[in-house]
Image: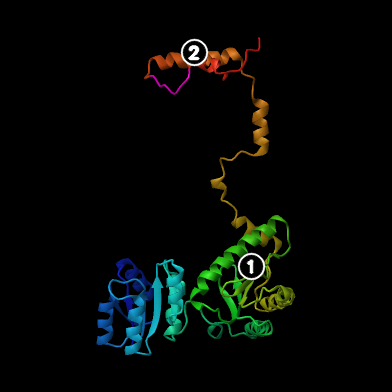
Amino acid sequence: MPHRILIVDDHRDVIRLLNSALDSLDHEFEIVEAPSGEEAFLEVSQGKIDLAVIDYLLPGMSGLELMDKIIKRNKEAQIILISGSKERKIKKSLLEAGAFAFFEKPISLTDFLDAVERCLELQRTVLPSEEENDEDSDAHKNLSGLLAKFRKNMDAQVIFLLSDKGHILARAGALQHGSLEASLLSALMGIFRAGRKISGYIHQETPLSYHIFPGGDQDVLLVPVSHTHAMVVAGERLAERKKILDLTDAMMMLKSEVEHVLNAMGVVRPSPAKEEEYLAAEDIPEEQIEDEISSDELEALFKQKTKIQTDEIKSFWDEAIDTQKTQEVEPDKLSYEQARQLGLTPEDNA
């Protein structure tokens, strides 16, 4: 029997977007739509709801009021809250409301679909978990074991091994706010690619740009493994002064082990020529800079310039004045004589 999902939002385009996103999953759903809390609760009264996706700001009762009514009627129903409000007080109340996940508009559809699969306990197809990874080789098991052991030893919440395309090769643990996993990892890999480019400029053999984001809900570290892979570590108080040095040393050792396992999996380090291709692919396309002048070309232009005589300038102004007499007078233009009186013409060399 298909899971029944209720989408509640007074904006038709939001409902249409979420409906289309759910249709893209390889799961069977019965999707019910409602533009208000009152109509949504009527749908709940007429049949069991497995998941309700509720906008906070609705005409009539609020999203939180609707959530309470649904849970009182069906304690097994899962709730995902969404909101376009940027007020901290509202955001805090939504985060603490007890919903399975909370998303701010505009919604990351990748994170939203992953949350739907997790809360309905479906096979995860959007962001597969470590147990559902397709790789069954001993090498992959060793890799997952390495990450799990490191996570435990360093008291981290989660560690990911990612490719430069953003694919998760292995993971151990889970983020504190799993609903934001795709957005966070995508932003971090953008930083990784930028760091890789800078490493190329300064001729680093391997990217070594560690990035540390302390504070907030948890500390996050981004550590490059090679030109094509990076690790992300997250957890509470990882970036404390007395802990960060030990963590960095441990990451260096883990990095070496991970490279060894990647080689066993057939993920070999790119050749120097290939590494140059990675950097070149990130440069501005040549057709977009074809109008730029090189320093050699600019120097040649300066050498070719000839000195313009004062009488040539005067002749130009006289010709311009004659032309202006046949056209409409434009008060914002000066005659040569006016320009000379204002000191805007070159002095006579004679």
Residue 24 in view of the camera? no
Check the image and name the residue furthest to the top: 350
Check the image and name the residue furthest to the front: 89
What residue is at 57 percent from the left and 48 percent from the top? 286
Residue 208 in view of the camera? yes
Q: CA distance from mark 2 to mark 1?
A: 66 Å
Specify start and end residues of the magenta stretch as a single range.
329-334
What residue is at 46 percent from the left and 77 percent from the top? 95
- Near mark 2 (Cα within 10 A), the count class, few <14, some 14-19 or many ≥20, is some
Give the x, y percent position of residue 33.
29, 76
Q: Nearer the viewer, mark 2 or mark 1?
A: 2
Q: Dividing the picture into quarters, in which one does residue 37 lie?
A: bottom left
Q: Which mark is residue 318?
A: 2
* Image height of 345 relative to 164, above or below: above
Q: Nearer the viewer, residue 124 or 17?
A: 17
- Near mark 1 (Cα within 10 A), the count class, few <14, some 14-19 or many ≥20, is many
Secondary structure under badge 2? helix
Q: Which mark is residue 228?
A: 1
- Number of marks drawn: 2
Q: Quadrant of the C terminus?
A: top right
N-term-proximal mark, 2 vs 1? 1
* Image height of 339 relative to 230, above or below: above
What residue is at 40 percent from the left and 78 percent from the top? 80
Q: Main secondary structure of the magenta part?
A: loop
Q: Amino acid at mark 2?
A: Asp
Residue 330 sits inside the magenta stretch: yes
Secondary structure under badge 1? loop
Q: Nearer the viewer, residue 137 or 242?
A: 242
Q: Quadrant of the N terminus?
A: bottom left
Residue 131 sits inside the magenta stretch: no
Give the x, y percent position of residue 82.
40, 73
Give the x, y percent position of residue 187.
55, 66
